Image (cartoon, helix red, strand yellow):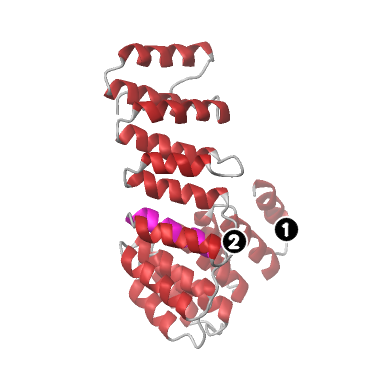
Amino acid sequence: MASARFLFDQCSAKDIVAWSALISGYAQNGQPNEAVKIFQEMSTKNIKPDEFIMVSLMSACSQVGCLQVAKWVDSYLSQSSIDVRQAHVLAALINMNAMCGNMERATRLFEEMPKRDLISYCSMVQGLSINGQGDQAVSLFSKMLTEGLAPDEVAFTVILTVCSRSGLVEEGWHFFESMRHKYHLNPSPDHYACMVSLLSRSGRLKAAYDLLKSMHEEPHAGAWGALLAACKLNCNAELGELVAYRLFELEPQNPGNYVLLSDIYAATGRWLDVSAVRTKMEEQGIKKIPGISYLV
């Protein structure tokens, strides 16, 4: 994005396509605040945005999660000549309001849709979940299924994340199993990671470990890391050792894994093992993350 911004700044005559490309680039590359700033700069030059710029802007606002900014964008859009009834614009508007906590506005827009699709349903499900309404999110997802919409891999990631965040173990298992057996979708490492997080948070560490071991492909470090953190929370040194040493193979230079194992040992009074972990880190030239104690 630095190169794109440099080229943009070198342009003597910037048209709407250039502005759109830069805003979209920032929104898609995890720099939503920069996208909002560029839009504000564009507005000061009296350049009218088109629907594509507004969709990118709403995507950026969804990532920022600021209700005040979302209301400002919503108001700006309502005063423009852009047709909000267009499916992609309306979907972005619903998602922005839901992600920024304005569930009343998101729900009203959602209910007024002539035809609801998978994207709009998932936006609402995510919004309900991050606003502490996990049960309602699951109910809405179930309603979507009864209406005949077939969820894809992304939709299952959404609902499994909801179940994990809300501690809905049985519901999570139900959706995970239906993904495989009813909709015939192969769970990705991300889906397994969601299930491991769900099981770990509910204290079912052995079930989470067995699920990872049952995978046909290697689980990514994020899944193992979630389980290791749960082992620390539950003071499970036996399983924590197995998980930590797997992570040492996957991420040999990640100090966080060593610190977590050291904390597990410390919590169970195994001080010689704490010392051994520190020695191992020193031998491999691994430095502890500043500001993180061995005892958490």
Q: Amino acid at mark 1?
A: Cys
Q: Quadrant of the C terminus?
A: top left
Q: Residues within 10 Å of mark 2 (few under 14, many from 20)?
A: some
The residue at 52%/62% (across/down) is 179
Q: Nearer the viewer, residue 64 or 104?
A: 104
Judge left or right: residue 176 versus residue 82.
Answer: left
Alpha carbons under labels 2 and 1: distance apart: 47 Å
Residue 33 lies, in percent from the top left, at 49, 55
Judge left or right: residue 66 versus residue 184.
Answer: left
| Tag shown at residue 11 | 1
Give the mark nearer the N terminus: 2 vs 1: 1
Seen from this angle, which residue lies furthest bottom? 114
- Mark whose residue sits in front, 2 or 1: 2
Which segment did they paint magenta?
A: 153-166
Q: Quadrant of residue 133?
A: bottom left
Q: Nearer the viewer, residue 207 or 61?
A: 207
Q: Residues within 10 Å of mark 1 (few under 14, many from 20)?
A: few
Residue 78 lies, in percent from the top left, at 47, 82
Tags 2 and 1 touching, CB below 8 Å: no
Q: Is residue 165 magenta?
A: yes
Q: Amino acid at mark 2?
A: Leu
Q: Residue under circle 2?
A: 185
The residue at 43%/80% (across/down) is 110
Residue 290 appears anywhere in the view = no
Considering only vertical position in the picture, is 42 above or below 31?
below
The residue at 42%/57% (across/down) is 173
Q: Nearer the viewer, residue 279 or 272?
A: 272
The total of numbered circles placed on residues is 2
